[in-house]
Image: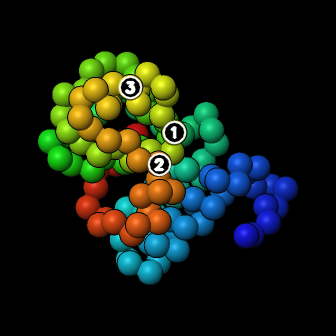
Amino acid sequence: MATIRKTQTTNQVLFDTIRELKKLSNSTGANVYKAVAAKLSSTASQRPEVNLDRIEKYSQDKEVVIVPGKVLGNGTLTKKVTIVGFKASETAIAKIEKAGATFVEIKDYISKKHDAKMKILG
């Protein structure tokens, strides 16, 4: 495990996730992973927070949506999408499960080396 320099994040999970996204981008050539890593590398206040109503509006059924930040529970979700995010509120997770959709943390999603065809929101 790499050590964190003082100028970097102190969140080891975030640090490891960013490093793995960059590795995956280099090995697969999929720029979507590099874009997500760049958004996660920004300060916490600049990382996107996306509500369920926005995911509902911009996604299609059975699509993979990635949120390089936090998923919040405002709004309703009716589509059976896979939402990949760094974090999610308890309310959001409850509404996602109620809709028959799934939430997967980014680190878990990339560890399985899924297809790079996904929509970035945020």
- Residue marked by disc 1: 87
Q: Could you say whether the residue bearing mark 3 is in a helix, strand or loop?
A: helix
Q: Given this view, does label 3 or label 1 mark the residue nearer the observer?
A: 3
Question: Are discs 3 and 1 less than 8 Å apart at CB?
Answer: no
In this view, the residue in front, 68 or 7, is 68
Picture coordinates of residue 75 (x, y %)?
31, 18
Q: Amino acid at mark 3?
A: Ala
Which callout, 3 or 1, points at the residue further toward the start of the chain? 1
Q: Could you say whether the residue bearing mark 1 is in a helix, strand or loop?
A: strand
What mark, if any, has residue 105 been given in the picture? 2
| Residue 5 image-quadrant placement | bottom right
Q: Could you say whether the residue bearing mark 2 is in a helix, strand or loop?
A: strand
User: Is residue 56 something one can see in this rendering?
Assistant: no
Q: Amino acid at mark 2?
A: Glu
Q: Quadrant of the C terminus?
A: top left
Task: Give the answer, above or below, for where 34 lies relative to 58.
Answer: below
Picture coordinates of residue 35 (x, y %)?
44, 58
Question: Are discs 1 and 2 less than 8 Å apart at CB?
Answer: yes
Picture coordinates of residue 13 (x, y %)?
64, 53
Q: CA distance from mark 3 to mark 1?
A: 13 Å
Q: CA distance from mark 1 to mark 2?
A: 7 Å
Classed neighbour count for the residue bearing mark 1: other residues with Cα under 10 Å, few (<14), some (14–19), many (≥20): some
Q: Residue at x 57, y 60 (%)?
A: 18
User: Is residue 91 something one can see in this rendering?
Assistant: yes
What mark, if any, has residue 94 been given in the picture? 3
| Residue 98 image-quadrant placement | top left
**Residue extending furthest bottom?**
27
| Residue 31 image-quadrant placement | bottom left
